[in-house]
Structures are given as structure tokens and as C-alpha cells.
Image (tube, coloured by chain):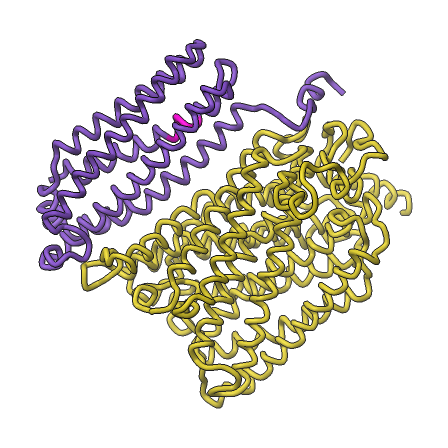
Amino acid sequence: MATSAVLVEAAEPDFYHAATKHKGILSWILSTDHKRIGILYLATMLVFFFTAAVLGVLMRLEMLTPGKTIMEPQTYNTFFTLHGIMMIFLFIIPGMPAVFGNFMMPIMIGAKDVFFPRLNLFSWWLFLAGGLLALVSVFLPGGAADTGWTFYVPYSVRTTTNVIPAISAAFVLGFSSILTGLNFITTIHRMRAPGMSWFKMPLFVWALYATAWIQILATPIIGITLLLVGLERLFGVGIFDPTLGGDPVLYQHLFWIYSHPAVYIMILPGFGIVSEILPVFARRTIFGYKFIAFSSLAIAFVGSLVWAHHMFTVGMSNTGMFVFSFLTFLVSIPSAIKVFNWIATLYKGSIELEVPLLFILSFIVQFCIGGFTGLILGTLSINIHVQDTYFVVGHFHYVMFGGMGFALFAALHYWYPKMFGKMYKKAPAVVSWFLLTIGFNVLYFPFFLLGYLGMPRRYYDYLPEFQTLHQISTVGSWILFTGLVIMFVNLAVSLRRGQKASANPWGGETLEWKVPSPPPHENFHEVPVVTTGPYDYSKYEHVVQEAK
Amino acid sequence: MTSSVTAVAQGHVHRDDVGTKLGMWLFLFTELILFGGMFIVYAVYRFKYPTEFHLAATELDTLVGTVNTLILLTSSLTIAMSITSIQEGKKGLSLLLVGITIALALAFLVNKYFEWGHKFAVGLYPGSPELLNRPVGEILYFGLYFVMTGLHGLHVIIGAVVLAVMMVFIAKGTVTMHSFVRLEAGALYWHLVDIIWIFLFPLFYLLH
């Protein structure tokens, strides 16, 4: 991206060393600098992620043998509930926008901060409060919630466990998500640098924009729904209680009106990362920029109308089932457009197999598996057979972890030099990528087979014929966890020991690579003027022509 | 670099009233959708139990509801007038008008208190023995009545607190005739509280 002048004076201190109003820890938790808030989110989010990952590994260990292996059935119920709540509300949903969106988006559009910096800090505080509420619900008398992350009524109204703290956590986290969303929309509308027209924005920013709209439009519905569950528990209002005339299926509708679009809150920023990383390491302009940008919006729109495909077995009219199944199939079109454009970007590119690209390649394969199994689930006749089995669990782990999780790891390795000003060691990073990819597939692919054979999800015990597949899967969880540990140890060690990163170690063309690593407090010394699109690699094409 | 660019670059503290109001409008959308969820629930159960909803609605006091509607509509007028006053530099008048708006909010809440109190007195509240003896449609009607007007009442309280903060801003000179976007945002919130009531009133009090 061509810009008019040198963007930052060399002597300016980076944002870690710039003068702050407060000292020590206060300079972080009271900072309104979008970069510091991004790092705060990263640190808190990783704590929750690791807690939830350990819960997952323990659950897999329990499934090693039929019957009791290491824990009681009730413990298992609370584990899968907590694993879901923490992974979804504390890791996947806020992960990309709150960490990398906060840190990178203002720099990528040439702004000095987000539009509402104080609101941004407030969102992090809400995020922290929500996380603490989720943890508190574990230790209060009554025991951790055992409803699953979906809080389905009537069980969530009747169980004696701490459902109210858990739904309060989700409510507060939803509020945090809404405020981040409206902050980003306002920022993208009002603070783009001169010359940064809508179609010169990096595709990650487009993805965040689509995500922010879903955050704003869908999250209030989960807020009111969880509030109603709380009121139901406290006062017995009757809205979801059949004995008082209420309808539990209505709860499922309201829940999925939010929670299905939320799936796109989780995955769209991941798509944005892929579109960001591929051109850099293929040294080619992204193929089909506008198609990728608009397909994000199309996914956001159509994805808001497919919620009842989670409910094909609860009792719905045939017309309803047909319409929701049809719309579900429609979502695959914009998703496929993205995948085709990514592949086309790699075609005849000058590919450099750096760590971020390796994670992206895993992403594309795993996301495709997740996407295709989604179509199988969206097919009415097959859905009846595999609903509520391990097939569903396999599907969403392929999309959420194999897709969004791997995109997040890619983003972490891509922007690590920019965020921390250090390079990580490549060899251990490649090893961790290898272990994560192998471990992931060994862990989750057996889920499809188990589900197809009839293993129901969330069951503590199983029939002996399922044991081999369960054991393969558990071994996969060990490989996966080893990969995670190696990856994070490598990144943590490099914080101190890593070599100093240059401003642009990968040869990226977007604006964040035009400022030093790490960026100075106000990002740009002078506001940049943008004249070309975000992935202008024409200078390399020139070299290729000459070589011929 | 052109002069328009340096104008943008002046300092970290930017001022962009259009952007601030855009953010506020986005927030108001989320509030509308929050209540939208409740309106869906209301629509579903009204469709399912039309007769019971009809009968239960006759037990609400239309007069109290009408008075509260008039109070809120007047308060929307006074808050709009306070913006016009500050734009014309009449600080005292603006303060007075925001004060009247808050007083009207309190009047609304007092009315609501007596209305709810009466319902409790005759045993019409969620889980009461009197209500549990009635057909399920009526149980749902009163359940929704308390949840929806309660949530709205909570927003009235929040709105009144926001407006009280605005009075401090006007008094301290943070909100002036040259910089009144905060007051505008607060007034937008107050209009939201108003418009939600405009829908609650016919749904509960008038649709007999």
C-alpha cells in the first residue's frame, strides 16, 4: 500500500515504553490505548482458553474406557458445560475481534485509536467480570452448572446447580461483545485514513465489519432470553414452563436466533485472517477482493435466517423444516466463494511456507471438512439420524477449532512480531503446527464415525463397541495438547529471547507493516494517505516478468 | 500532505459529533432488539391464547396507563426543548427542562408503583395462588406484563440517571451551546424509553 511519507519518526518510543498516565499494572488495566487493550484481552483470553482446554483433555481421558475412568458423572456434566461456556463465550466469540481487531484494525485503516477508547476499556472490564462470574459459578455452593452451554429449558430452570451465575456471565459477556461491535462499526465508518475507501480496506477489516453487525443485531436476543430463564428460576413467570402455558421450544428458537449467527461471529474474523495472510505469503494480490468482501456480508445476512436447523427434531412444520434446510444450503454458496478465491490466490503465487501460512493451509482443509459435514447435518433426512450425536460435536469442532482456532493461531504467528517486536523460533513453531494438525484430526475425525454409528453426545458412558474410536480420539487429545504447549512455550520464550523484529518481516503491504514493531503510542506520526488497494504486489509481478 | 489531512491529524482527542451519534444509534438498535425478543414472545402467546389475553387485559387500569403515556410524551417534549435551549445558549432554561424531564420520569415511576402495588394487593403476581388458579393464558399475560413493564421501568430509571448526569454536565459547562452531543445522546436514550412505552401501552392496556 503506497503511502505519502515516512509514517513514524525513528526515535519515537513504542507503545510499551511511551509515557503513561498510570504506573505498573494500572498502566494496563486503565489504559484506553487500543493496543494495550488488545494485549489485555489476549492475556485474559489465553487463561480461559487453557482452563477450558484442560477440561477438554480431562473429558477425553474420562472417555478412554466405558463407565468411570477418572471422574463422577455429575463432574463430567459440569465439565462439558464449563468447557462450552468458556470456549464459546470467553475464547471464540471475543477472540479475534477483541484481540486482533482491537490491536490491528485501527492501524490497518490508518487511525490512531478506536472511536470510543473509554468504551473499549469498559468492554474489557465487562469481559473480565463475565469471566470471573463464570469461574465463581463453579465454586459457589450448589455446584457448577450442568446444563450444557445451551442452557435448554426446562432442565436449566429445574436443576439446583448455579445456573444464574452462569447465565449472568453469558449476559455480561454479551454486553461486552455488543459494545465492541458498535465501537468497531463507528470506527470503520468514521476513522478511515484519507484515501482509504471501502474497497481499499484490508479484508480483515471487512470481516470485522460484518462480524460487528451480527454482534449488534443478534446478541440482544440472547440477553433477553437468558434474562427470561433467570426470571423463570427466581419467580416462576411461566414463559418457558409448559405447566403454566409456556413453551420450551420457544426458548430453543430464541436461543438459536442468537447462537446460530454467533457461529458466524466466531468464524468470519477467521475468514478475514485467511484473506490477510494468503496474499502476503503467495506474493499475489488477493483473487476476487469484492467477492470476498461481499460474501462476508452475505454470510452475515443469510446466516441470521437459518437458526432452526438446530431444531429439526423438536417438532416443527414441514414447511418450516424445508425453508430452514434450504437457507442452510444457501449459506454454503458465499462460504464456497471464499474458499475458491483463496485457492485461486495461491495459484501461480510465489509461495513461502512460513508458519502463519501453514496454519492457514490446515484451516482451509479442516474448514472444508467442517463445512461439508454441515451440509450433511442440514439435510433433513440425515439430520434425524445424526442429531445430538458425536457427528454434531465433530462438525462444530472442525469449524470452530479446526477453522477459527487455527486461524487464530495463524494470526498469532503472523502478527506476533508486530505486537511484541520480537521474532519467534521457526523450528518449534513448525513442530507445534504439525502436532496440532495431526492431533486435531486424530481427536475429532473419529467423532464423525462415532456419531454416525449412534454414539450420543454428552453421554458419560458408552457401549463397548465404541471403545476403539474413543481411544483413538483420546490419544489425539494428548498429541493436540502437546502441540499447544510447545506453541505457547515457544511464543512465551521468544518474548524475552526472540530476535528483534523489523517493521515488516513478512513483506506485507497493509498499513500495520508500515509502522515500527511494536507500533508507537499513536500508531502514526502523520496520518497516512492511501492511494492503492491493500494487497498491491505489482512490484513482485514485475520481477517475475523479467525472470521470464 | 494536504490541509484536510492535517486537520484530521490534530491530536489524539478527536471530535466527531456525527460519529458519536452513530454509536448511540447503534446502541439504541440493540435496545430495540432486546425488547424485540420480548415482543416476539408476546406475539407468540397472544396468538396461542387470544381469549385469555383479551380477558386479562380488561383487568388493567386503562386510565393509569393513559396518564403514564401522557407523562412520557410530555417528557420527550421537554428533553427536546432542553436541547434547543442549550443550542441557543440558555443554560438555565436547559437545566430546568432536563429537571422537569427527570421529575416526569419519577412521576411515571410513582404511578407504576401504585399500579403494581394494586396488582400485588389483589394477588395477581407470578406464582401467586390467585393467579395459579386461572387459565394458563392469563398466567402468561400477567407474567409478560410484569416482565415487560418491569424491564421498561428499569430503563426509565437508567434514563433518569443518565439525564441527571446531563444536568451535572450542563452545570459544569461540559455541555455547552457549542458542544451538546452528550445531551443529544442522552435525549436519544430518553426517546427510546418513550417509544418502547408507546408500543407497550396499546399491547397491554388497549387491546381488549
- Rendered residue at 68%/46% (across/down): A287
Residue B78: image quadrant is top left
Report the side of A482 relative to B166 (left or right). Answer: right
- Rendered residue at 50%/85% (across/down): A466
Q: Give the range drawn in magenta.
A: B185-189
In front: A393, or A522?
A: A522
Q: The yellow chain is which one?
A: A
In front: A75, or B26?
A: A75
Q: Where is residue A107 in the image (x, y as percent from the top left)?
A: 69, 38
In front: A93, or A511?
A: A93
Q: Give the residue at the far right of this rendering.
A: A547
Magenta span includes B186: yes
Q: The purple chain is which one?
A: B
Q: Position of residue A284 (x, y in %)?
A: 76, 46
In front: A458, or A38?
A: A38
- Quadrant in the picture for the N terminus of chain B: top right
- Quadrant in the picture for the C terminus of chain B: top left
Majority secondary structure in the magenta region: helix
Report the side of B56 relative to A519 (left or right). Answer: left
| Residue B86 to residue A90: above or below | above
Q: Where is residue A451 in the image (x, y as percent from the top left)?
A: 47, 76
